[in-house]
Image: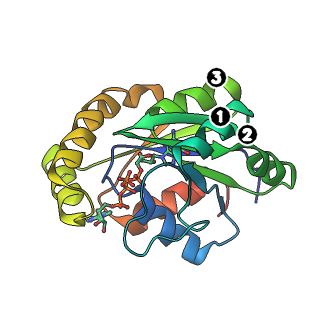
Amino acid sequence: MSERPRLTVLSGPSGVGKSTVVAHMRKEHPEVWLSVSATTRKPRPGERHGVQYFFVTDEEMDKLIANGELLEWAEFAGNRYGTPRAAVHERLEAGEPVLLEIDLQGARLVRESMPEAQLVFLAPPSWDELVRRLTGRGTEAPEVIERRLAAARIELAAESEFDTTLVNTSVEDVARELLALMNVV
Ligand SMILES: Nc1ncnc2c1ncn2[C@@H]1O[C@H](COP(=O)(O)OP(=O)(O)OP(=O)(O)O)[C@@H](O)[C@H]1O
Ligand SMILES: Nc1nc2c(ncn2[C@@H]2O[C@H](COP(=O)(O)O)[C@@H](O)[C@H]2O)c(=O)[nH]1
């Protein structure tokens, strides 16, 4: 590792492949620490509490927010999501490469509170391919897909706010590029 690791934020429209890229990257490089967010969204089949997310009630999320326990939080497509603050700071202080996979609103908040963070935007090869991926994943009802696509138009329009854009044509290529940006390889 050539430089001190810093916080990296990966954002991009729902269905672009953020989780797929990060999972691929962490298979080879488990030393990259991925923050586990809290969310009020219901678990998808196979998702486990404490692994993909901390699945919390609305009341629990209210408390996390009120107690200042979240580094950032946002409402996205009808659910709330937030990054637990303490774990991120602990890992950064330990010198580990830290990655947040969060939406545009969260990325903007992190930029305000931690201007040294690098913001990476994951873009789809095309709009049609984004729709295919989001629909093909088969995890959301049609009305939820519509909400996520409406958010995607806003997120795509904000690409220039990010330090770097990676286009997710190949999971392997993007994972390699992200590792390089994080100074892990
Ligand atoms: N490069 C790629 N080529 C083809 N399909 C891909 C590629 N990357 C991801 N996918 C597929 O796209 C779908 C969405 O990927 P994924 O769930 O990782 O997206 P995401 O950005 O994490 O979405 P969300 O923000 O909704 O959590 C999945 O079915 C995944 O297998
Ligand atoms: N602002 C935040 N956004 C987050 C966080 N954790 C995840 N996300 C983003 O939410 C959407 C939807 O995720 P899904 O798992 O329901 O498909 C996606 O863009 C995630 O990146 C967070 O802590 N804060």
Which numbered disc, 3 or 1, marks the residue closer to the eye? 1
Q: Are marks 3 and 1 in contact (CB under 8 Å)?
A: no
CA gap between label 3 and label 2 equals 17 Å
Asked if 46 appears above or below 163 in the picture, the reply is below
Asked if 87 appears above or below 47 in the picture, the reply is above
Q: What's the mark number on residue 65?
A: 1
Q: Disc 2 residue type?
A: Glu
Determine whether the residue tagged by mark 3 lies in a helix, strand or loop. Answer: helix
Q: Quadrant of the C terminus?
A: bottom right
Q: Are marks 1 and 2 in contact (CB under 8 Å)?
A: yes
The answer to whether 157 appears left or right of 110 in the picture is left
Q: Which residue is mark 3?
A: 112
Q: What's the mark number on residue 69?
A: 2
Place of residue 82 in the rendered image (x, y in percent of width and height, measured from the top left) = 58, 42
Which numbered disc, 3 or 2, marks the residue closer to the eye? 2
Place of residue 165 in the rendered image (x, y in percent of width and height, measured from the top left) = 42, 41
CA gap between label 3 and label 1 equals 17 Å
Do we see residue 182 in this rendering? no
Residue sticking out furthest to the right: 94
Q: Earlier in the sequence, mark 3 or mark 2?
A: 2
Q: Residue at x 50, y 63 (%)?
A: 22
Place of residue 86 in the rendered image (x, y in percent of width and height, measured from the top left) = 79, 46
Q: Disc 1 residue type?
A: Ile
